[in-house]
Amino acid sequence: MKKTLVLIAAAAGLALVAQPAAAAGGKGHALRDGNFSFEGPFGTFDQGQLQRGYKVYREVCASCHAMDLMSFRTLAEPGGPFYDAHQASAAENRFVRALAKEVQIADIDTETGEPIMRDGTAADRFPNPYPNATAAAAANGGAAPPDLSVMAKARHGGARYIYSLLTGYLNPPAELQIRPGQYYNAYMAGDLTPFMPEGSHDVPPGGFIAMPNPLMDGQVTYDDGSAETADQYARDVSAFIAWASDPKQVQRKQSGVGTLIFLLLFAGITYMSYRRIWKGVAH
């Protein structure tokens, strides 16, 4: 029984440290710490930050990157950037309905069968900036921009990786051989040894990326008075992408912590019952 209690306590400890560990630095190059509020077993998303992050995505990232798995109504679900407890349902959320109406959705006229463009609704998914992957690659020098729907789940480090990448554009070393259409980023995965002079031992960290630096100071206007800097934009959009990758993250963590507390209490009661029932009995 004592071993069981020890194992349960160890599992609880691992659960408490698992999330920060997953957000640790990338291989060979420590990721930047974004001080995100949602990190850790008790962390929650900052709704204001999510709203700012959505604005950065909509005004900057959405021109190249799709989020095919995201629907507008998801923005109004509990924990989302535009959740309103006074609204009966996510589909009726006034903020989401207004945001969806700002975009045009390709559709088919049900009466004529002709292709049309209509205002978006809360039920629509985020529009893709390109009709297909081939068109996306052709418009971006042969490299199709990746979908951002689950990008934080697909990259080691999650939001920290995205934040580090967006702020990792540096002036490359003078001896680094960069091809046209490529940009040096200190956090991009890669090996730059083949692009350095033969025999060079001072190989910079990082790699090449086909996306130029997308953020600059003053690019997006914030309505809440937050700093309008590239660093703040990167931090906010990274938080939004992390939320979009796992909208139920907070609820899942709360359920997990509650389950661990229950198991610990249950184990304690079981142990005390065991001691009481077998008290004075040789076994």
Image (tube, helix red, strand yellow):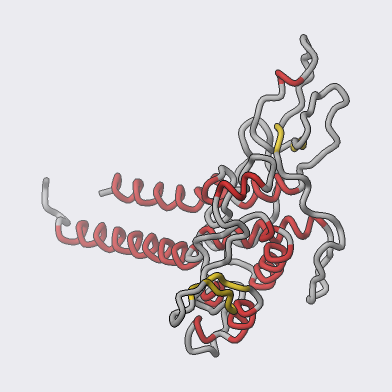
Residue 197 shown left or right of residue 70 in the figure: right
At 77% from the left edge and 19% from the top edge, which residue is drawn? 196
Q: Quadrant of residue 252?
A: bottom left
Marks counted in the figure total 0
**Left or right for 170, reference 74:** right
222 up-or-down from 98: above or below: above
Q: Residue at x 56, y 73 (%)?
A: 75
Percent x, y for residue 247?
51, 65
Report the side of 277 relative to 139 (left or right).
left
Where residue 188 appears, x then y in whole percent? 68, 37
Q: Residue at x 59, y 82 (%)?
A: 97
Residue 117 in which image quadrant = bottom right
Report x, y in % for residue 229: 84, 59
Image x and y of residue 213, in percent = 78, 47
Q: Nearer the viewer, residue 165 or 6?
A: 165
Seen in the picture, residue 58 relative to 204 is either above or below; the reply is: below
- Image quadrant in which the C terminus is located: top left
Residue 191 sits in quarter:
top right
